[in-house]
Amino acid sequence: MLWQRVVTAVAMLLVLLPALFHAQIEPFAALSLLLIVAAAWEWGRLNGLASRWALLAGVLLGAALTALWWSGAVQRPWPLLWWSVGVLWVLLAAWMLRRGVLRWTDWPVWPRRLLGWFLIACAWLALVQARLQGLEFLLSVLVLVWTADVAAYFGGKAFGRRKLAPSVSPGKSWEGVYSGVLGVALVGVLWLYLDHLGITRGGSVFQRLWSDWGWGAALLLAGLVAMSVAGDLVESLVKRSAGVKDSSRLLPGHGGVLDRVDALLPVLPLAMMVISR
C-alpha cells in the first residue's frame, strides 16, 4: 500500500541520511553493513537455503567484512578487484539473461550462493570506498542510478514498444533504457555546469569521468546505466526462478533490501572501476 511505502521510505531516510552526511565514515559503514547482512540473508533464501541458515550466512559475511574493515583494508585502493568484479558483472549479467529464468537452477546451488554473497560483499566495499572518495562522489552515483530508474520508468510508460526481457521483467522496454541514458546524460551535463558555476565541488562521478575520459565519459555513463538495468533484471530473474515477487518483506511496501539495491550492486564496483588507474 502507498502509505506503507511512504512511511517506510521516510523512516529509512531518517536513519540513513544522518549516517551518510556524518563527517566520519563509521556510522555509514556500520549501517550499510547491517543492510548487507540482510541482503545476504535474502540471497540465501532465494537460492534454497533455510531461513536460519541464510541468516547465519549473512551474519558470517558481516563478521568477515567487519574484520576486513578493522584491519584497515577498506581504506586501501583495490583497482584490480574493481576491474575483475566489473568484468565479472558484465559477463555474468549477459550470460544469465541469455540463458533465462529456467536455466538459473541448472547451476550447482552452492556456487550460486557463494557468487551472490561475494558480489554483495564487493558492493559494500565499493559503497564504503565511494563514500571515502567524497560525499559528492557517492551521492552522484546514487543520483545516476535513481535517475536511470525514474527516467526509464516514465520513458517506458510513454514510448515503450519493444520489450527488453519479456520473460524476466515484462514491463521493461528498450525505449525505457534509452530514456534512462538520456536522463542520466542531462543530469551529468547539469552537474558539470553547476561545477563550472562553483555551486558543486567538482567531486562527482560525472566530473571524474569527464576529467579522466573526456567525451568517452558519455559511453561510460551509458554503460553504467545499462548495468543498472542489468542488476535489476538479474535480481528479477533469480526471484522468478524462486517463484517469489519480493526478495523478502523486511521493508513494508518496498519488499526486501535486494529489491531496493539491485541496480546498485553492479554500478558501485563499476563506478570504482572506471575511476581506478
Image (cartoon, grey):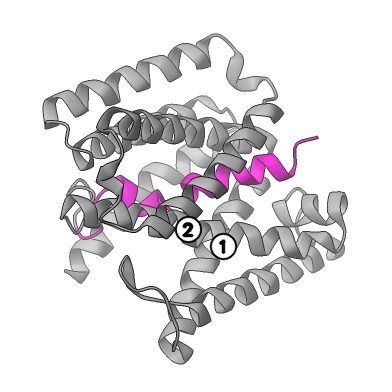
Q: Identify residue for label 1.
A: 226
Give the x, y percent position of residue 224.
61, 57
Q: Is residue 64 above or below residue 50?
A: above
Q: Under tag 1, what secondary structure?
A: helix
Asked if residue 255 can be seen in this view, the reply is no
Please check the rendered image and state whether residue 24 is part of the magenta-colored stretch, yes or no: no
Could you give the CA–CA distance between mark 2 and mark 1, rounded to whole angstroms? Answer: 6 Å
What crowding class fits label 1: few (fewer than 14 Cα within 10 Å), some (14-19), or many (20 or more)?
A: some
Give the x, y percent position of residue 168.
32, 65
Q: Is residue 245 above or below residue 119?
A: below
In-image side of 11 versus 173 (left or right): left
Q: Under tag 2, what secondary structure?
A: helix
Please check the rendered image and state whether residue 273 is part of the magenta-colored stretch, yes or no: yes
Asked if residue 125 can be seen in this view, the reply is yes
Q: Quadrant of residue 170?
A: bottom left
For image coordinates 61% across by 75% down, the residue present is 183
In-image side of 250 versus 192 (left or right): left
In-image side of 213 versus 227 (left or right): right
- Give the tally of numbered discs: 2
Q: Is residue 2 above or below residue 88?
A: below
In-image side of 107 versus 203 (left or right): left
Front residue (pair 117, 106): 106
Instruction: Look at the image and tell me in which quarter the N terminus lies.
Output: bottom left
For image coordinates 36% across by 15% down, the residue present is 63
**Residue kind at label 1, given as amino acid type:** Ala
Q: Identify residue for label 2.
A: 230
Magenta segment: 253-277
